[in-house]
Image (cartoon, grey):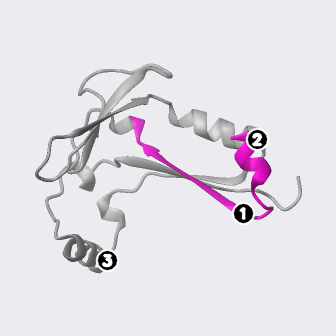
Amino acid sequence: MKEIYRVLKPDSPFVILDTNHDSTGIEFSTMRNGIPGKKYTYGESRQEWLHIQNQEDLILHDFHWPMSMYQELLKEVGFREIEQLEPTLRDIPDEELKIIEQKHEFNQWKNEWNYPPFVIYRSIKPTQE
């Protein structure tokens, strides 16, 4: 994180996308991270299953990082205006969602309506340190 901060120009945004640890074990249309009902600890190894149409799931090996860790690291290295977003499908305007569904020929959503599969962190490298 320090190296990213170092090479970014002042006033530059930095965005992180990660699976939402509060949604661990919940089945989504395109993925599931972790085993349902299992409580993972800080840094514990965790598998993610990416559902690929007409193919076997792609299994990724990841680690369980609490959301607070990202907030703390971003602040510690100097990023400001840190935002944490946990969007669901309800956050996408209906017309925009229809366009996405038509473009990708997909509308078989599962728990994306009620649970955020991902967490997004937005931050800015300040002009002056």
Q: Which residue is mark 1?
A: 12
State which tag comes first along the sequence, 3 or 1: 1
| Residue indicated by mark 2 | 77
Tell me where residue 37 appears, x and y as whole percent.
Answer: 25, 24
Q: Is residue 71 magenta?
A: no
Give residue 96's mark: 3
C-alpha gap between disc 2 and disc 3: 36 Å
Q: Residue at x 26, y 53 (%)?
A: 112
Residue 3, percent from left and from top? 74, 43
Q: How far apart are the two marked residues, 2 and 1, measured between alpha carbons?
A: 14 Å
Among the two numbered marks 2 and 3 on one chain, the one whose residue lies closer to the N terminus: 2
Which of the two labelled residues, at mark 2 and mark 1, occupies the earlier sequence position?
1
In magenta stretch: residue 17:
yes
Which residue in the rendered view is the most extreme toward the left?
A: 54
What segment carries the magenta color?
1-21
Question: Where 129 sits versus 101, above or below?
Answer: above
Which residue corresponds to the image point at 24% horizontal and 76% vertical from the top-left?
103
Q: Residue 73: percent from the left, percent from the top?
A: 67, 37
| Image position of 54 (left or right of 2) | left
User: Residue 45 or 83: which is nearer the viewer?
Assistant: 45
Please, what secondary structure does the residue beneath circle 1 have?
loop
Q: Where does the image place residue 85, in percent across and percent down from the top left?
A: 49, 53
Answer whether labels 2 and 1 touch (C-beta < 8 Å).
no
- Amino acid carrying mark 2 in the image: Val
C-beta proximity under 8 Å, tags 3 and 1: no
